[in-house]
Amino acid sequence: MRLGLAGGALCVIGGVAVLAGVLPPSELATIAERVWPVLLFVVAATIVAELAAAAGLFDLVAERLARAARGRTWLLWLLVLGLATVTTAFLSLDTTAVLLTPVVVTMARQHRLDPLPFAFVTVVLANTASLVLPVSNLTNLLAAERAGVTDPWRFLTLLGPSAAIAIVVSAVVLTVVFLPRLPRRHEPAAPPEVSDPVLLRVAGVVVAVLLPLLVIGIAPWIPALAAAAVLGAAFLWRAPRAIRPTVVPWSLLLFAGGLFVVVGAAEQLGLGVLTAALVGHESVWQVAGAGLVAANAVNNLPAFLALESAAGGGERLAALLVGVNAGPLLTPWASLATLLWFGRLKAMGVEVRWTRFVVLGLVVAPLTVAAAVLPLAL
């Protein structure tokens, strides 16, 4: 609800800026041309993830991982780390924070394990593992479009080493902090109930086909939209009541759309002078540090939009992504995924103290960002 209110306020401010002539119609058209493919992908991917979760796909995957662990908690821990990484890389950080978090929390409870360590895995890796592919994060899609690096393999060539380091560093910190607190072995749990095996199979096939299509070089909104249409049709056939307006991320659309317009207006008023001073002209370290600080001060999406022009392209733009993607773990509002994660945990009765989140972030964020910038600096 708060995200929707914030989005509505941004849209009002943006509308006033357009009516007042601060943002010319030509600039507004340029912004719209840039962002519609990005937002269309976000909508389609969210629908696919929501419906796949409703079909029980994430529950089934988690159950298979638990079965593979055979009561060994350390192996289950590693498998959850891997699942969170893959989910973030291919289905975006919001999917990990919103849909995977309830799955791993439920799985932990069923195996009589403390759910909080597993919940921290999803929120941390939702951020640090979002450097892998353009589709992993909205900021990546914007950066890829700006730099003309729409081919996922070119993107991976530039940011792959940084992404791998960010994932490993954050995973090691999480393991050192949380794994010793968990018992060495856990009890097996009953497999989850499947309400509609046909829908589950369809969801599994759709997601299995979608994932490789996101890395073959075509515009990601095309396969995502097709997958959403196929899965939506399957639900209309088998479970029409599950097709509700809430499967579309209206609040996120309002927030992102309004934010694009407001930042565009701010740039017309001279925002670039301030951001150029923040990111400097040469050092990738300064760009990444500015991204980390700005993301935690406001939010990673407006931080990226405000700093992208001053950052430029190449390694400096990649360093900005490291800062705004892997760095927003110091404040609760630094990432929308974190706010959504907290909301899901609260709804499930899992208490998280923000002080604990901040203390962990003070360790994870600086270490991860500093290490992940190294390949770009070299």
Image (cartoon, rainbow, N blue to C red):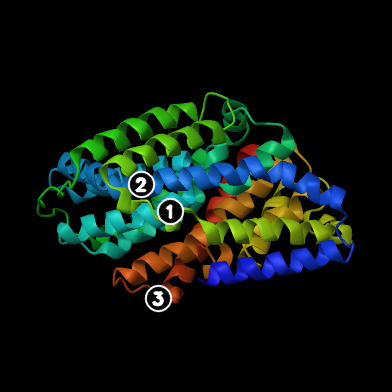
Q: Residue at x 63, y 53 (%)?
A: 323
- Asked whether the residues under the numbered discs 2 and 1 touch, taking CB atoms below 8 Å apart as contact, a structural biologist would say yes
At mark 1, the secondary structure is helix
Of the numbered discs in the image, which one, if any, rests on residue 353? Answer: 3
Q: Residue at x 59, y 47 (%)?
A: 138
Query: Cα distance, mark 3 to mark 1?
Result: 29 Å
- Asked whether the residues under the numbered discs 3 and 2 touch, taking CB atoms below 8 Å apart as contact, a structural biologist would say no
Q: Quadrant of residue 330?
A: bottom right
The mark closer to the camera, 3 or 1, is 1
Q: Is residue 319 visible?
A: yes
Q: Inspect the image, locate mark 1, and give the three-letter code of the amino acid beneath it.
A: Val
Name the spot of residue 195 as percent of width and height, x first.
18, 47
Of the pair 107 and 281, the residue shown nearer to us: 107
The answer to whether residue 187 is above or below residue 235 is below
Query: Is the C terminus in the top left, top right, bottom left or bottom right quadrant?
Result: top right
Q: Inspect the image, locate mark 2, and give the three-letter code of the amino acid beneath it.
A: Leu
Q: Local crowd at mark 1 within 10 Å, few (<14), some, or many (≥20)?
A: some
Q: Residue at x 69, y 53 (%)?
A: 304
List the residue tagged with mark 2.
51
Query: Cα distance, mark 2 to mark 1?
Result: 8 Å
Q: Quadrant of residue 141?
A: top right
Name the spot of residue 5 as percent of width and height, x first.
58, 71
Q: Earlier in the sequence, mark 3 or mark 2?
A: 2
List the residue tagged with mark 1.
247
Is residue 134 found left or right of 315 in the rendered image?
left
Name the spot of residue 295 as percent of width and height, x first.
63, 61
Q: Residue at x 48, y 66 (%)?
A: 339
At mark 3, the secondary structure is loop
Q: Earlier in the sequence, mark 3 or mark 1?
A: 1
The answer to whether residue 110 is above or below residue 237 is below
Of the numbered discs in the image, which one, if any, rests on residue 10? Answer: none
